[in-house]
């Protein structure tokens, strides 16, 4: 694997992880379109884990104030202080990772069998349209109104997103908008929810990873690039939703899905 390929894939991962367009789908489609099949299945999975952890670093860097706020508040009982609403929200954010964790451990092999290009294209379209419908719901709830029920329901959305093409942020945003959260609050909650899921999945996968020394440089370049572009994506998304809906992302998903299906139909690739 060349460093250039790693950097391109790192950029793709960083930008698509926090936009509701599915980073796993974009990594698969990029490799498919350019014919980058130089990695074995095991090494490809390890590289994807590396760039996902890179985006985790970027997101933590941007959301560090929110993380510190909820972490300090959540651990208040250890200092013999009452658990505030921020503390409860912090624990609910942690609980939101449970559905994705359970599904990921139980159904990893079955999900990997459904990552064909045609399936990814169809899923991009279908879940994009679902996001469009959900985004029409009225905005009536703020970030401080996040409950355990919300956490588990949005966590189920994250679990569904283990299928490439769904999008972790897209599915969770769909559920959050159906629950009536304001766009800005929904995006910030979804980004915070993603951190324990990405960290848990990454660490779980790294336990079995065996990366040859010749691949260390591309892996590190890919992770570093995804960290920088992940930070940019979080910044851009939070600014965008203050004045725009999710409709541009829906159109992008539909056009991309139809474009991929057209390529498959013409046997161009």
Image: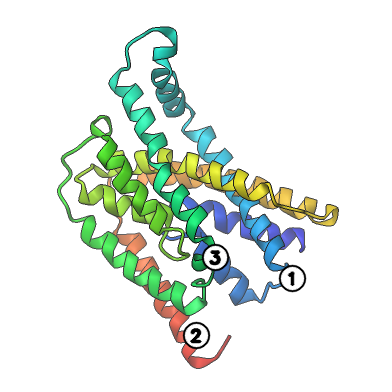
Q: Which mark is residue 263?
A: 2
Residue 237 in the image, given as x and y percentages of width and height: 40, 47
Find out whether the residues at labels 3 and 2 contact each other: C-beta distance under 8 Å: no
Q: Residue furthest bottom?
A: 266
Label 3 element class: helix
- Between 263 and 236, the residue placed more toward the observer is 263
Q: Residue at x 45, y 50 (%)?
A: 102
Cα separation between marks 3 and 2: 27 Å
Residue 21 higher or lower than 258, as above or below: above
Which label lies toward us, 3 or 2? 3
Q: Are marks 1 and 2 in contact (CB under 8 Å)?
A: no
Q: Is residue 146 above or below residue 256?
A: above
Q: Name the residue beneath numbered marker 3.
A: 109
Discs 1/3, front = 3
Residue 244 visible in the picture: no
Q: Tell which residue pokes out farthest to the top in this image.
A: 80
Identify residue for label 1. 38
Dividing the image into 4 quarters, which one contains the C terminus? Answer: bottom right
Q: How is the image coloured?
A: rainbow
Q: Looking at the image, tell me whether mark 3 or mark 2 is earlier in sequence order.
A: 3
Closer to viewer: mark 1 or mark 2: 1
Give the mark nearest the N terminus, 1 or 3: 1
Q: Determine whether the residue tagged by mark 1 lies in a helix, strand or loop.
A: loop
**What residue sits 28% from the left and 67% below the top?**
129
């Amino acid at each position: 694997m060349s460093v250039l390929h790693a950097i391109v894939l790192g950029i793709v991962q960083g930008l698509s992880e926090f936009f509701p367009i599915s980073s796993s789908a974009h990594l698969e489609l990029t490799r498919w379109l350019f014919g980058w099949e130089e990695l074995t299945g095991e090494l490809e999975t390890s590289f994807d884990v590396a760039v996902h952890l890179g985006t985790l670093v970027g997101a933590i860097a941007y959301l560090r104030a929110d993380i510190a706020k909820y972490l300090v508040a959540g651990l208040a009982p250890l200092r013999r202080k009452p658990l505030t609403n921020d503390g409860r929200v912090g624990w609910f954010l942690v609980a939101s990772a449970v559905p994705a964790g359970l599904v990921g451990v139980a159904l990893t092999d079955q999900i990997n069998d459904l990552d064909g290009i045609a399936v990814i294209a169809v899923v991009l379209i279908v879940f994009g349209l679902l996001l469009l419908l959900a985004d029409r719901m009225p905005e009536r709830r703020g970030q401080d109104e996040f409950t355990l029920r919300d956490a588990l329901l949005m966590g189920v959305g994250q679990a569904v997103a283990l299928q490439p093409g769904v999008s972790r942020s897209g599915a969770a945003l769909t559920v959050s908008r159906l629950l009536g959260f304001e766009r800005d609050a929904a995006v910030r909650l979804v980004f915070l929810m993603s951190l324990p899921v990405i960290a848990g999945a990454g660490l779980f996968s790294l336990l079995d990873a065996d990366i040859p020394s010749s691949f260390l440089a591309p892996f590190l370049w890919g992770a570093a690039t995804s960290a920088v572009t992940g930070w940019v994506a979080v910044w851009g998304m939070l600014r965008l939703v203050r004045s725009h809906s999710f409709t541009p992302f829906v159109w992008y998903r539909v056009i991309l899905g139809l474009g991929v299906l057209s390529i498959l139909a013409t046997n161009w690739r």
